[in-house]
Every structure is written in structure tokens, then in C-alpha cells.
């Protein structure tokens, strides 16, 4: 697994072990050893691999069932599936590894794009239906955006970053701005909300403010350079950048413009008595996590490492990421790789010389509108609650994740 | 000079081309459309697709239903198979609170026919999503009856109430207006104003 970062010698050894029978009984080759050089064996490619390539068989990073609920279940329903962030590099989650969230389980609809239609109606001057070909005639945009499930919450039982943070992913989405289509239909003055509806069996629907539609909602037909995958809403998915995952309506078939909050089934579950909690369960806060080294991984020994991680916020682009390598006493500015995009994962790194002593690694981020990722202790203080094992973060949990490094190089969950 | 003249002509030509393009883009100016792509659905098509039932109930179809019919449909349509005969003993989400009515509604579980602020949401969801794999097969009368039954077993309505497009939106749900409204969303605003300002100081400029 890519979850370990062995040194070069260890890498060659583990490579040999993975190659199995090829080197069975023979000593693993080591650098500088004088022996006849053989190249690697060849991958036998079939027509399928020529048509659509596979990754190396030595790369085994996979998604897992979130919270232990298997998918598909006995009825064929898909539930929550977490992305392997511990193995991630860069900011794009491969489509095959993108996390999946469904509302109380869902069957994946098998939609023929030639038959698919999007209807926009309600408080508009001209209701319109669009074929997929129609939608591709409009001016397109391509943007990086993360999606995160409201249930992406670390717990002391979680054993690795896939379990603590794997219900978020980031992809490059291509499509038409919803505002382009709404202008084409002509919004009436009384339009204040809209309902987006999917084509799956329960026709999941969510209500969102028109202000969001006109700002940056995207009707995506493309994902990471190809068509949106069925698990992500083929052939159309509504992107609502920075809002909780459930709003990103998959298999989008209808948008109804309305004059009030419609409180659909998907919305009613988010109602709360406390206005503060309701607000914190809506737009995603600034959040970051160190993906290397993270729980379940192993440092082979003291010395230099690049600490690496991901940061994102529903409030905009990430402006600052800081890392503490001493349990929060001092914070060092991390390098943001490339240019941080709005409502997208940003990859950060920090060179670190580990002295081989026990310590704790933390990361925190600040977004472009000045929101700062808090610790759980700070959140408890805000709510005037004691900070102990029973404390649960109200709203979406964007708290700082601590990773403990033991003197033997093993990494564990700091909440455990 | 000559080159400047050429440049001016080129600019003019460019401007003309742009103007032509703009005119083309406004070809449907009379209709207000910028691109003229898409088809206008008929009123019947919209009606057939529009399954959203809002809080006012204005989209509700004609028809009516009773608790008694709903109880029968709950068994005959297979609801009991997934949600349990007593609505709390199936594999699918429970449809009745296990806590007694004297407990605060917020502490009685996230149960649609109990916690939804509008009975219309119950109607909407049964109609759009149930029964699983046979969604869309229930008649309006059947949806009214099932809604009535689920509201009755949660002590929301009385056994003899008849639900229709007029009475359903008027059903007083236990939650009433005791729920927070969402913040008025605007671009580039924090998710909650002043959140953590006191307890989480801003990082120092480095």
C-alpha cells in the first residue's frame, strides 16, 4: 500500500515481495550489488486495457465502506463509501476513488444520456427542457471543487485518515453555470429558492437559495476529463460549491424555481432548533488534515520528511495553512502547492526533520474570508461545554485532527 | 502611417464581427433568450414532471384519503414489509416515535410524519419515493390515505380526519414553527457571523 513511505532500500524489497514468485528464494536485489540486471516483467495488455487503461497491479489503494455499513447491501443499495486520502497526492481525487454519499441508500440509475432531459420551470418567464446535446452548446466552465459529506467527522475509534476524513473528495468539474440557464429561462422577481431533483428511485430533492444558484452553481456533465461517473450522478450533477454534500444533486432532471424554502425530505433532516447549529450545518467551514504521516502509517526512522495534507473551505480559497509538529505549541506556515482554488482541496506541505521523539502533528487552515479552523477544545469553549470524550461538535465538524507520532515511528489517532 | 491605417481597418472589421456576433447572440432578443437553446415544454409535460409539493400545498392533486384506508394500504402496498407492522420494527427507517407524546418533539427522533414542519412533506415523499422500486404507482387517494395513517399513528391527527388538498396543508405539525430558519446566504460570508471569534485568535502574520 502507498500508506507506507519506506526508504529506497525498503521500497525495492517490498517491490520484490509484491512481485511474488519472480524473486522467490532469491535475495532481494540491493543497490550497488553487482549482478546481472534484468528489467521488469511485462504487463500483458488486453483489448480492454488498450481501450481504457488500468492502474498498476502494485497500486492497491481502494475505497472502504464508511461506518462499516457494506455496499451494495442485500437489496443492492449503495451507502456511504470513503476515499483513501492516506494514499492521495495532488488535489484531484481519481473518479474511481471519489467518495460516494447517498441519502439512506440508493440504487444507481442506469440513465441513457440520449433520453435524459433537464427541465427548468416554476417562477421563470420561459420554462425550458434541455437535452444533453443542448447543454453542451452553452458556454462551459471547468472548475476544481471539493464535495464533503455532512457526516465526515473524526472519532476516537477511527484508525486512519480514510475513516476520519475520507468522506470528501475533489475533482475537476465541467458544465454549464446554473445562472446561464436561469437567465435563459428568465427569473421572475418573486424567485427566492429553487428545488433540485434527481432521477433516482426516490427522486431526491433539496432546496437552495437562488442567490447560490446565481453565484456559482454548476450543472456538470464532465468530471476529471470524461463524463461524470454513474456513482457521481451521470449524466448530470448539480455542483453547489462549498455547501454540504447532499445538495450536490446527482442524476439531475429538474429544477423548480420557487418563492419559499420547500423543506423537502432531504431538507427536513437538517432542521434544527438552534439557528447557530442550523447555520453550521449548511456551508462547510475551513478544514484541513495531514494525510502523511497519518494514523496507520509508519515512519521508518528519524530524519527528513515532507508532511503533506489537504485543506478546503466552503467559504472560498484556502489562504493559509499552518502545521504544528509539537502538539500545538508552535505553528509553521506550510507551503500551498500551486494556486489554491475556491471551494477546492488545496495540497500543502512542510519539510520536517523528525528527531525520533514522541510528538503530535496538527494542521489548521484559514480561508480567504478569514475563517479559521478551530480545535475541538475551542469549539467546546464557544458552546460553554466541557471538553471531554462525550463532546460532539455541533454542525459540520471542521476541527483540527491530531496525529500522534510514537518514538518507534508509528502514527495513531490523537483523539483515541 | 500605412500600417496604422491597416490597423484601424482591422480594428473596425474586428468590431463589426463582434457586433455581428452579438446580434446573432441576441437573435432571440424578443423572447429574452440569449442563446435560444432548449425547448419549451407543454403545460402537460410540466405537470407530469412536477412532483414537488411545497408548504402551501398548491401543487396537491385532487383526491382524498382516510386513516382507515391508510392502515389497510400500509399492509397491502408492502410498507409493513420494510418499515415493520408497527412502523418501528422494520429494516427501513422507523415511521413512529418510540418516545411518548409528552416528550419534547425534538427528542422523539428524526421521524418524517412527526418532525416535518409541514404535512405536505410527508405527502411529497411518499408520492415521489415509495414504495421502493414501485415509486409513482400510488394514486393520489392512496397517498392521502397513507399520509393520514402515518400522521394518525404519531398522534398528529385524529382517526376520523379526512385529508385532501385543502385540509392537508392545514394540519398542525407538532414542531409548529419551533425550528430555526437558515441564514440568508450571500457569497463570501462566513457560515456563522462571529463564530469562535472569542475563543480562536487569528494566526499571527508570518
Image (tube, grey):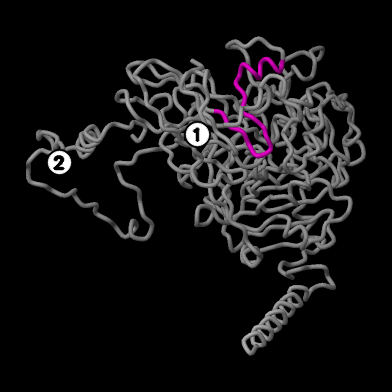
* Residue A334, numbered circle: 1
Magenta-drawn stretch contains A371: yes
Q: Residue at x 61, y 27 (%)?
A: B203
Magenta-drawn stretch contains A325: no
From the image, tell me which residue sits under label 2. Answer: A22
Please state if B7 lies on the left or on the right of A336 as rendered. Answer: right
Q: Residue at x 7, y 46 (%)?
A: A36
Report which quarter residue B182 is drawn in: top right
**Rendered position, A249 above or below A324:** below
Q: Chain of mark 1?
A: A
**Rendered position, A234 above or below A99:** below
Q: Residue furthest bottom?
A: B2
* Whole-number angstrom distance, CA of label 2 to CA of label 1: 43 Å
Label 1 residue SS: loop
Indicate the position of residue B142 as horizontal and vertical percent values.
78, 39
Report which quarter residue A21 is drawn in: top left
Q: Which residues are magenta?
A: A364-383
Q: Residue furthest front?
A: B1
Residue B131 visible within the image: no
Please state if B181 lies on the left or on the right of A4 as rendered. Answer: right
Residue A98 visible within the image: yes
Q: Quadrant of the N terminus of chain A?
A: top left
* Residue B6, numbered circle: none
Q: Earlier in the sequence, mark 2 or mark 1?
A: 2
Indicate the position of residue B139 as horizontal and vertical percent values.
77, 45
Q: Chain of mark 2?
A: A
Amino acid at each position: 500500500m502507498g500508506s507506507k513511505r519506506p526508504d529506497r532500500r525498503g521500497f525495492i524489497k517490498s517491490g520484490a515481495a509484491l512481485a511474488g514468485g519472480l524473486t522467490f528464494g532469491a535475495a532481494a536485489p540491493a543497490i550497488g550489488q553487482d549482478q546481472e540486471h534484468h528489467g521488469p516483467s511485462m504487463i500483458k495488455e488486453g483489448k480492454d486495457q488498450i481501450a481504457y487503461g488500468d492502474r498498476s497491479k502494485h497500486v492497491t489503494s481502494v475505497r472502504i465502506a464508511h461506518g462499516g455499513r457494506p455496499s451494495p447491501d442485500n437489496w443492492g443499495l449503495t451507502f456511504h463509501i470513503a476515499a483513501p486520502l492516506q494514499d492521495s497526492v495532488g488535489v484531484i481525487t481519481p473518479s474511481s476513488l471519489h467518495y460516494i454519499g447517498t441519502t439512506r441508500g440508493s440504487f444507481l440509475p442506469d440513465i441513457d444520456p440520449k433520453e435524459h432531459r433537464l427541465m427548468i420551470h416554476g417562477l421563470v418567464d420561459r420554462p425550458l427542457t434541455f437535452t444533453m446535446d443542448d447543454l453542451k452548446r452553452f458556454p462551459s466552465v471547468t472548475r476544481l471543487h471539493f464535495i464533503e459529506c455532512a457526516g465526515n467527522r473524526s472519532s476516537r475509534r477511527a484508525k486512519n485518515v480514510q475513516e476520519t476524513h475520507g468522506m470528501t473528495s475533489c475533482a475537476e468539474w465541467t458544465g454549464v453555470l446554473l445562472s446561464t440557464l436561469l437567465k435563459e429561462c428568465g427569473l421572475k422577481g418573486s424567485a427566492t429558492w429553487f428545488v433540485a431533483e434527481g432521477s433516482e428511485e426516490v427522486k431526491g430533492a433539496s432546496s437552495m437559495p437562488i442567490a447560490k444558484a446565481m453565484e456559482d452553481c454548476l450543472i456538470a456533465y464532465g468530471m476529471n476529463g470524461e463524463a461524470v461517473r454513474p456513482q457521481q450522478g451521470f449524466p448530470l450533477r448539480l455542483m453547489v460549491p462549498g455547501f454540504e454534500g447532499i445538495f450536490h444533486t446527482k442524476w439531475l432532471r429538474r429544477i423548480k424555481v420557487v418563492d419559499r424554502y420547500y423543506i423537502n425530505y432531504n431538507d427536513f433532516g437538517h432542521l434544527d432548533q438552534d439557528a447557530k447549529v442550523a447555520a453550521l450545518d449548511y456551508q462547510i467551514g475551513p478544514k484541513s488534515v495531514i494525510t502523511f504521516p497519518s494514523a496507520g502509517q509508519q515512519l521508518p526512522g528519524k530524519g527528513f520528511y515532507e508532511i503533506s495534507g489537504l485543506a478546503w473551505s466552503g467559504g472560498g480559497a484556502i489562504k493559509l495553512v499552518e502545521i504544528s509538529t509539537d502538539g500545538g505549541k508552535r505553528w509553521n506556515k506550510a507551503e500551498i502547492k500551486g494556486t489554491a482554488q475556491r471551494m477546492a482541496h488545496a495540497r500543502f506541505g512542510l519539510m520536517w526533520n523528525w528527531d525520533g521523539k514522541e510528538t503530535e502533528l496538527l494542521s489548521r487552515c484559514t480561508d480567504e474570508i478569514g475563517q479559521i479552523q478551530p480545535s475541538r477544545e475551542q469549539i467546546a469553549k464557544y458552546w460553554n461545554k466541557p471538553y471531554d470524550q462525550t463532546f460532539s461538535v455541533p454542525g459540520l465538524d471542521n476541527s483540527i485532527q491530531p496525529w500522534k507520532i510514537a518514538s518507534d515511528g508509528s502514527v495513531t489517532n490523537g483523539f483515541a | 502611417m500605412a500600417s496604422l491605417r491597416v490597423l484601424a481597418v482591422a480594428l473596425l472589421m474586428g468590431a463589426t464581427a463582434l457586433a455581428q456576433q452579438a446580434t446573432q447572440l441576441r437573435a432571440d432578443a424578443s423572447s429574452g433568450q440569449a442563446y435560444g437553446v432548449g425547448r419549451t415544454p407543454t403545460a402537460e409535460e410540466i405537470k407530469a414532471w412536477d412532483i414537488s409539493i411545497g408548504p402551501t400545498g398548491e401543487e396537491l392533486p385532487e383526491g382524498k384519503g382516510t386513516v382507515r384506508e391508510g392502515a389497510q394500504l400500509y399492509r397491502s402496498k408492502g410498507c409493513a414489509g420494510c418499515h415493520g407492522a408497527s412502523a418501528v420494527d422494520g429494516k427501513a427507517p422507523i415511521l413512529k416515535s418510540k418516545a411518548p407524546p409528552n416528550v419534547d418533539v425534538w427528542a422523539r427522533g428524526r421521524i418524517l410524519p412527526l418532525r416535518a414542519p409541514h404535512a405536505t412533506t410527508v405527502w411529497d415523499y411518499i408520492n415521489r419515493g415509495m414504495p421502493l422500486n414501485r415509486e409513482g404507482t400510488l394514486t393520489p387517494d392512496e397517498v392521502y390515505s397513507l399520509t393520514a395513517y402515518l400522521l394518525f399513528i404519531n398522534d398528529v391527527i385524529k382517526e376520523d380526519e379526512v385529508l385532501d388538498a385543502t385540509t392537508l396543508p392545514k394540519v398542525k405539525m407538532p414542531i409548529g414553527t419551533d425550528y430555526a430558519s437558515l441564514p440568508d446566504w450571500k457569497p463570501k460570508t462566513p457560515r456563522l457571523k462571529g463564530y469562535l471569534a472569542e475563543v480562536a485568535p487569528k494566526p499571527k502574520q508570518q
